[in-house]
Amino acid sequence: MALARTLSVALVGVAGHLIEVEADIAQGLPATIVVGLPDTALREARDRIRAAIVNSGQAWPQSKITIGLSPASLPKRGSGFDLAIAIAILAAADVLPLTSPAGIMFLAELGLDGSLRPVPGVLPAVVAAAAGGVQTVVVAPGNAAEAELVPSVRVITAASLAEVAIWLRGGPPPLPPDPPDDPPDQQDSVLAPAARHRDLAEVLGQSEARKAAEICAAGGHNLSLLGPPGAGKTMLAERLPTILPRLDPVAALEVTSIHSVAGSLRPGAGLLTEPPFCAPHHTASKAAIVGGGSGIIRPGAASLAHRGVLFLDEAPEFQRDVLDALRQPLEAGEVVIARSAMCARFPARFTLVLAANPCPCAKASSGGAGCGCSPAARRRYLGRLSGPLLDRVDVKVQLQPVSRHEMLYDRKFTETSAVVAQRVAAARERMARRLAGTSWRLNAEIPGAELRRSFPPEQAAMRPLDRAMELGQVSARGADKIVRVAWSVADLAGKPRPGPAEVEVAIGLWLGVSR
Amino acid sequence: MRAKDVLGRDGEQAAVNYLEGCGYRILDRNWRCADGEIDIVAVDRHTLVVCEVKTRSGTRYGTPLEAVGRVKRSRLRRLAVYWLNAHGIRFEQIRVDVVGLLYEGTGGFTIEHVRGVG
């Protein structure tokens, strides 16, 4: 008959909040009450916990049990509080030493047999715990690798509630179990399977598009690919991650946290160091792309592609409001989802790649034969990509159908992903040196005013751009975009500043025609 | 008489003995009306106590105390008012208690008494 306290974490977006879990056992008819804005999964916890405690060979207290989760005003969701609640009850019932679980964070779902099960979002939760001064966390075996990514925290991995109880009574900590050997169901994952076997050299006959992809990889520019079916749009987009540099530690932690919250992380997997590639289907809803959902706020494809590539194949087929919802994350680099009780933030700084056919029947640019689309139909089709969205795409490439001869000929000139990735890495290094001391990392992120002030191209280089502006081909904002791409071209070429040639290339990529 | 009824009767007698031992004055036993039955009506100092007795021979189907749910508790409260009206008495305080008895096999019971449940 007492009060016991321990800790757990509630997640809002990818931000964790330390939650104090209290269990009070008092006189009264046997009943269990959970207070502190629990959702259904959490309210059901009392039935899971009761079975888990009884099946672990412990007695369920025959009294009135009140479970408090504070701060009480923050909505709490999911089954991750199970273990913390069970431990608090056992401590309050004098089965465990009363103060033994104080200051320790528990994060696992309980099976009815008392086994500990992994939960999503362990990495951001442990990060929040460490920030809150917690030194020891207890997680399920499936979450151990993820929790151990946080260096300043001691991670205890236990397979069952009984093992945790023995440890809290002063026994030895449970032995780390063997890593789980059954790969879990990956159907929910929106991520394409690992693209290790893919290579940029396989995209034959599209040297210009390959070069454009390289420039985008270097500077973080958004890319649109327009061309007939079979020209290699999808192939090229899928190979973009192979030429991107690996994620640096900070970015890797961000990316892994997002995927941890989304539940798309493989149990036992460590830090994600490869840039993610996310290709949602064109029927995807707005919530699937930017994040949201009823109840639990889940990161959308834009966040799952953070520091990687978001590929929208058949872009005009997407619902227009879905595409336009991407404008805000493209600008801000994060998604903010506001709800009545909370506001969730997900980072979403990705490279957007759009692919589209020139017309609904997709035969137009293969010589025009067989295409029955009227000019109006074509205009309407591409018109679904709104102007403001296309305005955020710096590099536009028209792919032409490839003949057999071109493919054979091009074979001599293709470079493997490894070679291109080296050039991209070198360009990024130059970029990093130049942008050292600023908050930007890529050319595409530099704001326009700063670009004009600190990073102007050579005087002579601006001449073709001035001419294009006079002709009305390029707006003032377009000019900024062109200068950013020109910087990426110069970085790839190892030039200290973009010259006329680089600006010419950038203008061509902006207008979507080769010059 | 069936075994469960014998157990129930023995349990109620044990509960009465226990309450009397605690200084309660028993006013009525097994009072029935159309709405249900009160096992024991007793007085604890100035409070009328309506007492539900629940006897079990084991915990396979849960403990005796668990078997008294919310519906039963609110019915007991209603029955307390009916009992007072039927007898024309007034009390300043009314309380609903539950006495849970677990049969120990040797003729004895383990008694748990929870005061003021509804």
Image: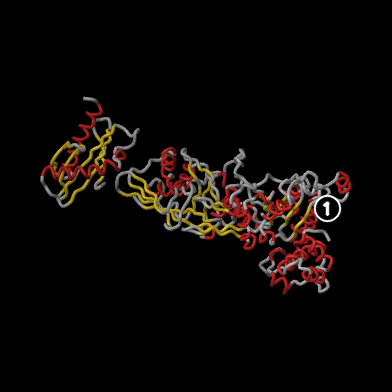
Can you see residue A273? no
Image side of residue A488 versus residue A106, left or right? right
Residue at image mark 1: A207
Number of disc labels = 1
User: Which residue type carries mark 1?
Assistant: Ser
In the displayed structure, does residue B112 sit left or right of residue A437?
A: left
Give the residue drawn at x 81%, y 62%. Answer: A505
Q: Nearer the viewer, residue B23 or B8?
A: B8
Residue A264 locus on image (x, y percent): 60, 47
Provide residue A417's location: percent of width, then percent of height: 79, 51
Q: Nearer the viewer, residue A114 or A162?
A: A114
| Residue A292 drawn at (x, y percent) | 55, 53
> Image quadrant of residue A447?
bottom right
- For residue A199, side relative to residue A303 (left or right): right
Picture layout, residue A148 above or below residue A328: above
Occupied quadrant, residue A308: bottom right
Tell me the residue at 47%/38% (across/down).
Answer: A113
Q: Position of residue B116 (x, y in %)?
A: 24, 48
Examine the rendering and report whether any part of residue A12 can be seen.
yes
Going by the picture, which residue comes out furthest to the top? B1
Task: Tell me the quadrant of the picture where the C terminus of chain A can be found.
Answer: bottom right
Towards the viewer: A168 or A282: A282
